[in-house]
Amino acid sequence: MTSSVEAKSSDHSSQNSLSRAESTLHDCAHCDVRALGICVALGDLEQKRLKGIATARHFGEGETIFSAEDPADVVGTVVRGAVKTYKLLPDGRQQVVGFLFPGDFVGSAIFGTNRCFAEALSPVELCVFPYAPLQRLMKELPVLEHELLRRAHDDLDLAQEWMLLLGRKTAQERVATFLCLLFEKAKKRGHCGAPIDLPMNRSEIADYLGLTIETVSRQLSKLKSAGVIAIHGSHAIELRRPNQLAELAAGAD
Amino acid sequence: MTSSVEAKSSDHSSQNSLSRAESTLHDCAHCDVRALGICVALGDLEQKRLKGIATARHFGEGETIFSAEDPADVVGTVVRGAVKTYKLLPDGRQQVVGFLFPGDFVGSAIFGTNRCFAEALSPVELCVFPYAPLQRLMKELPVLEHELLRRAHDDLDLAQEWMLLLGRKTAQERVATFLCLLFEKAKKRGHCGAPIDLPMNRSEIADYLGLTIETVSRQLSKLKSAGVIAIHGSHAIELRRPNQLAELAAGAD
DNA sequence: TGCTTGACTTGACCAAGGTCAAGGAGCAAC
DNA sequence: GTTGCTCCTTGACCTTGGTCAAGTCAAGCA
């Protein structure tokens, strides 16, 4: 029904059920996220060194990629699929701290243990760099470390932008901001117009925005009936009035 | 009245009014924050190189240190005083994204322009590293870049922890978590028992916790009458029952 | 074709925290 | 002392978004 799917599509082989499969890497030259991942910042020589320690890993939809407190053994680039990272309170309350898409870097190359959880929202392929070799490589390749520093600052800025959203924006502004971010990210990955696929469900959106599923649903309905967006089957959303959405996101009076 | 002040104290010279004074650095060997700043990660040689580009700058209480969108010309270590960093919405709503104390690194060594605002909460002394020389030094000294990467990850983790607070914690849990963080940071700076000084006012606490000043005040009063803390003159707080405060912060049932 | 299931939507009601307003404490100027 | 000021506290009331419950819709299956 929804024509334009991004993340969930094209798992031609059957790797989603018995996942955690580790395999040798495909050719970097044909990598889907070559222009988006950390590789793009490296020269040919550095890329080759990085490829030397990389392995491909697959995770099924809903599968935990890593857990807080565990050794940071999964660190690398999302090649295919979508990932959510989140923190938990003792009583189970959840805060999603990030949604990651192809090209994004997941996990901490610095801490020895994870500070949050990560879960596959769809069948996911990661290009993973094992801890010890990555540490060594970071020491030997300053450009690699510099690229990681640049990304850490980007992530920090986004997290602080999200603090502003969680601390000071209304429900309507939060949902509008979230959609703006999704459309922007999709655009960066080369997506033009057309509906984008939401790989996460309402509950995960709610946990990202500090709201409940009911409030998210109500605000989406409101945006839909205002003609700002169109919703196709609850997991595909089309942007109809970009300017109006941006105004709502910033807190138009 | 309040005996133990930290940040506001001991400005023996008169540099708070006509601030922005730039001066040569004091001797690093006698630096108050030597054990806390980025220097501690460097060897003697690297420290000397870093000192070579550093200058001291002073800011008066309430003075803006830098603004979002401006060139990132103030980047460095807080030597004395306290700083708040914050983001703004077009209509003036404010979210404090961090309170910085002696030893903390302020500003982005990566972006050419600031992504947030910074303001002195008390007379502040910074050890500033000018943009271009810092960029050069980062390339030449991998340990320096590594230390900045480590701190960026620490900051990111704290920001995500704060997303959890802003998105999912109750008013009581937020205030308790905030106080825990302050006491912890004070401890790290060598503070033992005794009341700690709050360099920020109620409005700034509220803007950090996504609350209003009234709610902050009510929750502080509640903690006070429960005997968890004692408040001396509204800007000094004493921890009476650490365990109970920690339980409240985590969301004790 | 109808049953079951799970995710989403919608409505009615409720409460945590926001808003508005009054009062108090501390402090500097006169 | 007292005036004025700012910041903090407290109380009364209100609003936004949460809670609870019922209804809708699509997919999978017998």
Image (tube, coloured by chain):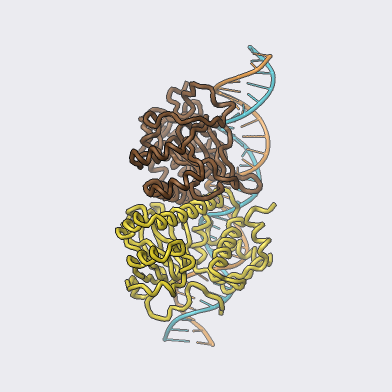
Chain colours: A yellow, B brown, C orange, D cyan
Query: Residue B18 location, x and y as percent?
Result: 59, 27
Q: Is residue B184 above or below residue C28?
A: below
Residue B133 spot, x, y in % from top left: 48, 44
Task: Indicate the quadrant where residue B192 lies.
Answer: top left
- In the rendered structure, the answer to whether residue B134 lies left or right of residue C29 reads left
Q: Quadrant of residue A176?
A: bottom right
What is the residue that sits farthest to the left in this orientation? A132
Q: Quadrant of residue A191?
A: bottom right
Is B195 or B100 nearer to us in this picture?
A: B100
Residue at the image position 58 percent from the left and 65 percent from the top: A183
Given residues B51 and B110, the one toward you in this image is: B51
Q: How many marks?
A: 0
Q: Is residue B198 above or below residue B41?
A: above
User: Can residue A234 be seen in the rendering of this structure?
Assistant: no
Give how far across and how far down residue B252 sits, in percent.
Answer: 40, 46
| Residue B112 pos. (x, y %) | 54, 49
Question: Is residue A130 toward the left or the right of residue B231 in the image?
Answer: left
Q: Residue at x 36, y 36 (%)?
A: B35
Could you tell me if residue A101 is visible in this image? yes
- For the point 47% across and 44% down, the residue is B134
Closer to the camera in the image, B102 or A27: A27
